[in-house]
Amino acid sequence: MILKSADEIVTLAQKSAISLVRFLFCDTTSVIRGKCTRTDKLKERIESGIGLVKGTMALNILDHLQVDTGLGAVGEVRLIPDLETWAVLPYSERSAALICDLQELDHRPWDHCPRSLLKRVVEEAKAAGYSFQIAFEPEFILGSFENGEYKPIDRSMCFSTDGMNRASKFINRFVDSLERQGIEVEQYYPEQGPGQHELSIRHTSPLKACDRQIYYRETLRGVALEQNLEAMIGPKPFEDQPGNGCHLHLSAWDIYQERNLFWAENGLSDFGRFFVAGILQHLPALVALTCPSVNSYRRLRPRAWSSAYTCWGFDNREAAVRVPSVYWGQEMATSNIELKCVDSSCNPYVALAAVIACGLDGVKRQLTLPPPVDVDPSTFSADEMIERKIERLPATLQEALIELEEDEMLMNVLGNFGKTFIAVKTSECGAFAGANTDFELSQHRTRF
Ligand code: GLU
Ligand code: MG
């Protein structure tokens, strides 16, 4: 990889007549925020960063500061851009962006920096001999609100060509805009719900996959705005319609990316079995990070293909971990696992760091994987559940947070950020507990 220099970035900005460059980061509650610099100050800002009050990471989804985190008006970090993330934004005139790390004034990564957390977990995995290929697979709903009434862009059926036609003006512009930012589109199709679509991005390294998820969300909202549409990527925009997943595909490799460690003739290697066992063992706590909004738990219900139980299976879309069938002639290359209980309200850096840590914990402890499930797990009796070691996933964010707080391994991985996360998210549970459903739905639809 050829690293870009500050001078090269400035030249690129001048060539595209960029007026403002956005320094972006994804916060504790997964809102993408940033500050902008003018192009004539860009070089200076790349070197010095842009100042940010530490309290920003203690804001909840209603933008309310949680002072019990210890973060507030005092204390400062710097937004330090990763120059490899440079992107000219096709949906916003004369604008470009860089994704940033949060650094302490003494240049160390701040212990609340999600991107630095992922980098640390990936580095530790690399030292142990492992690397990963990652793809997020977001779903979203397109529509508009006219006089308060919601109108989906289509009422077409799953995979239907009618849906493709009706959404094509948006989808074509979305695909072009992603490709212009170097983000390779893998597949697209209309999903089940009214106005619901799924467009996936090609797999890549963990950090890049998360950076792409940030640009994906930015581009989705930006293109929707251009076309007077609302793009709703929140987990459950409407109570009576299918939820939006953001399934996570993951494969583990040696550090030279030559050997897929999950691959075996029988469908999953011993390494893969330990890895999945690690995920399943930590899953009740892990979902607090992969499905971290109050709204997430309206989606995680049986018979919604979103997963609701701690089980796994081959090509089983009701299992939390699906092992998809491999493609002919590319068996090793396409061997991967899919985690279903992930949605776009997660901070991708935090969620992925946690998933990798759980999987590798299973490898380290050589955990035993229960047998695969080849039916809908909600059809099991209570006794079968116990026998098969299957649990219902937490039914609320509050329950998931309690599990997380008790998960020593995960809390260690998160460090000080873990306590802030729990405080911020607990405040959201409180804020929506007494509120009506519409308020909760409306506060999550377009936030992410
Ligand atoms: N919409 C489903 C979810 O919430 C996923 C449907 C599918 O693509 O399998 O996860
Ligand atoms: Mg889908």
Image (tube, helix red, strand yellow):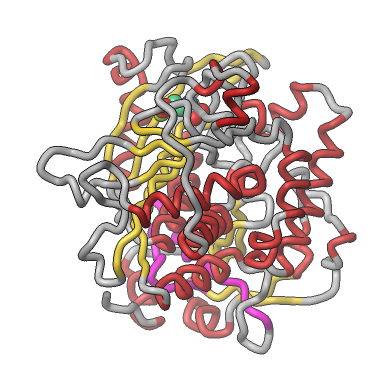
Residue beneath the point at 61% across and 13% down: 240
Residue 293, horizontal then vertical, whole percent: 68, 40
Where is 315 relative to 38, above or below?
A: above
Q: Is residue 229 visible?
A: no
Front in this rendered view, residue 157 or 122: 122
Q: Residue furthest bottom?
A: 106
Viewed as shown, does residue 339 lie left or right of 114?
left
Is residue 96 covered in magenta? yes
Above or below residue 112? Residue 106 is below
Number of numbered discs visible in the structure rendering: 0
Q: Give the side of residue 242 with respect to residue 178, left or right.
A: right
Residue at 36% over, 66% down:
131
List x then y, in percent, for residue 267: 27, 42
Q: Which residue is nearer to you in this view: 227 or 212?
A: 212
Which quarter of the figure has residue 129?
Answer: bottom left
Quarter of the figure with the N terminus: bottom left
Q: Nearer the viewer, residue 207 or 312?
A: 312
Question: As displayed, is residue 51 above or below residue 88?
Answer: below
Q: Is residue 259 left or right of residue 440?
A: left
**Residue 40: horizontal and vertical position, in percent?**
49, 77
Q: Residue at x 60, y 18 (%)?
A: 381
Q: Is residue 241 above or below residue 263?
A: above
Residue 249 lies, in percent from the top left, at 39, 45
Residue 54 in sight in this render: yes
Tell me if 430 is positioned left or right of 412 in this view: right
Pick the quarter of the image with the C terminus: top right
Q: Which residues are magenta?
A: 81-104
Does the magenta-highlighted stretch encompass residue 208? Answer: no
Which one is nearer the viewer's eye here, 314 or 415? 314
Residue drawn at the location 45% of the way across and 48% of the way down: 276
